[in-house]
Image (cartoon, helix red, strand yellow):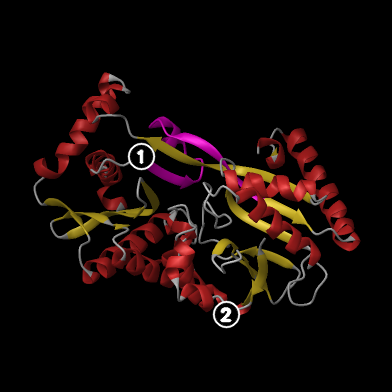
């Protein structure tokens, strides 16, 4: 029923974003506005290995966007992998497609049949940023298991979703009287603080200015505690700037800043889908910490989500305590290790598994938290 191929040139699909984005499920981190800038910055040392499923009318029904490093050609990863933190990575497939299972089975059959070939061969799929709640990836894992392929899924952290209540008043009622009072104070702070204003980027010039300020503030904060900071990598900085402009052109960028006497003291980088606001990064001036610019922006952002009728705020990966404190709910973020149905790959995985169990034993002995192992196939 389906024709499956492995494309070695991403521009074939990136130059026709409608075919790609229609299968993204509305998740911005699966769309070309995110992945095309990523490839421009990080793809120079990578080979595309994009598995595409077409039906009898040559319509694209599924895409597995993979690439492999020239240094380790037998390991395939998602396009978007590395410290860019591409959360909710997945197979591009309409989850409501009545034939979704068959499309995924065709993809798995292709991967198994071509594991030993030169063009599309692989020993491991290392797939990071997978949500444990993703039905497509659960179906993919189950299909691999039926084919006799080993899938190891582990989690070190979660993504955190704060659901919007039916009304702003109900949102406030979920908290204590003291918290409600502070929240209202943060909402009123912009109007009551002399010289303070909140501005959301609405021009390409402001995108450049606000992103630059966010990166600088973010770096200063981490450098102050002796850490290099996320944006120490120039390629990551350039990716974020290019991605922000792509999102702005597509009306998907949410980039507010807080100014005090003309100086930016806080900034958030958010990305919009049809029903969610994803907060990707932020930066705050340590010299203005007494004014709590981070909380002022966060409360205004939550109010914005209510005003726009969005489903909630997704704070993405990382188990920072404030996320649970504000009522966000966690979902495990997974790393999947898929072992090719070849004896050498299985031998290598056996050695890897032994090392993994040894590390788990050491964590138990020292009282550290264990890495969670999830059976994705059983949850399909």
Secondary structure at badge 1 equals strand
Q: From the viewer's perspective, is residue 118 above or below residue 98?
A: below
Other residues around mark 1 within 10 Å, as few (<14) / some (14–19) / many (≥20) = some
Front disc: 2 or 1? 1
| Mark number, residue 341 | none
Magenta-drawn segment = 312-335
Where does residue 311 sit, x and y in percent of width and height?
35, 39
Query: In the rendered view, does 16 fall on the left or right side of 254?
Result: right
Secondary structure at badge 2 equals helix
Q: What is the quadrant of the N terminus in the image?
A: bottom right
Query: Was residue 313 drawn as part of the magenta stretch in this picture?
Result: yes
Query: In the rendered view, does 263 fall on the left or right side of 279?
Result: left
Query: Which numbered disc flags the more N-terminal residue, 2 or 1?
Result: 2
Q: Which residue is mark 1?
A: 312
* Residue 139 vs residue 322, the one in the foreground: 139
* Residue 160 vs residue 184, the one in the foreground: 160
Image quarter of residue 250: bottom left
Where does residue 17 sit, x and y in percent of width and height?
44, 69
Let me know if residue 301 appears in the view. Answer: yes
Image quarter of residue 328: top left
| Residue occupying the point 80% across, 38% down | 361
Q: What is the quadrant of the C terminus in the image?
A: top right
Q: Which residue is mark 2?
A: 44
Let me know if residue 131 appears in the view. Answer: no
Q: CA distance from mark 2 to mark 1?
A: 36 Å
| Residue occupying the point 27% across, 24% down | 170
């Amino acid at each position: 029923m389906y024709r499956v191929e492995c494309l070695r040139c991403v521009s074939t699909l990136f130059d026709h974003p409608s075919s790609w984005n229609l299968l993204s499920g509305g998740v911005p981190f699966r769309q070309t506005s995110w992945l095309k800038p990523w490839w421009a910055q990080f793809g120079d040392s990578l080979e595309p290995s994009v598995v595409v499923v077409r039906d009898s009318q040559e319509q694209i029904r599924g895409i597995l966007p993979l690439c492999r490093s020239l240094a380790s050609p037998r390991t395939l990863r998602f396009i978007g992998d590395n410290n860019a933190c591409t959360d909710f990575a997945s197979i591009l497939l309409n989850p409501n497609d009545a034939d979704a299972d068959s499309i995924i089975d065709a993809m798995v059959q292709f991967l198994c049949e071509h594991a030993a070939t030169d063009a599309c061969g692989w020993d491991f799929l290392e797939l990071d940023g997978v949500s444990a709640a993703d039905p497509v990836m659960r179906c993919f894992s189950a299909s691999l298991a039926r084919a006799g392929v080993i899938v190891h899924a582990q989690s070190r952290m979660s993504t955190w979703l704060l659901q919007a209540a039916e009304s702003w008043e109900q949102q406030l009622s979920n908290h204590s009287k003291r918290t409600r009072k502070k929240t209202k104070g943060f909402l009123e702070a912009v109007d009551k603080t002399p010289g303070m204003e909140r501005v959301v980027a609405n021009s390409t010039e402001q995108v450049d200015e606000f992103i630059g300020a966010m990166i600088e503030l973010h770096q200063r904060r981490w450098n102050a505690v002796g850490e290099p900071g996320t944006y120490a990598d120039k390629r990551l900085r350039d990716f974020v700037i290019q991605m922000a402009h792509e999102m702005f052109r597509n009306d998907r960028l949410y980039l507010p800043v807080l100014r005090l006497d003309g100086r930016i003291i806080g900034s958030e980088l958010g990305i919009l889908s049809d029903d969610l606001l994803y907060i990707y990064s932020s930066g705050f001036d340590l010299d203005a910490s007494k004014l709590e610019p981070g909380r002022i922006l966060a409360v205004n952002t939550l109010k914005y989500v209510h005003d726009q009728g969005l489903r909630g705020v997704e704070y993405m990966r990382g188990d920072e305590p404030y996320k649970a404190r504000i009522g966000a709910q966690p979902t495990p973020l997974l790393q999947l290790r898929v072992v090719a149905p070849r004896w050498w790959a299985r031998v290598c995985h056996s050695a890897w598994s032994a090392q993994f169990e040894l590390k788990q034993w050491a964590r138990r002995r020292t009282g550290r938290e264990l890495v969670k192992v999830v059976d994705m196939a059983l949850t399909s």
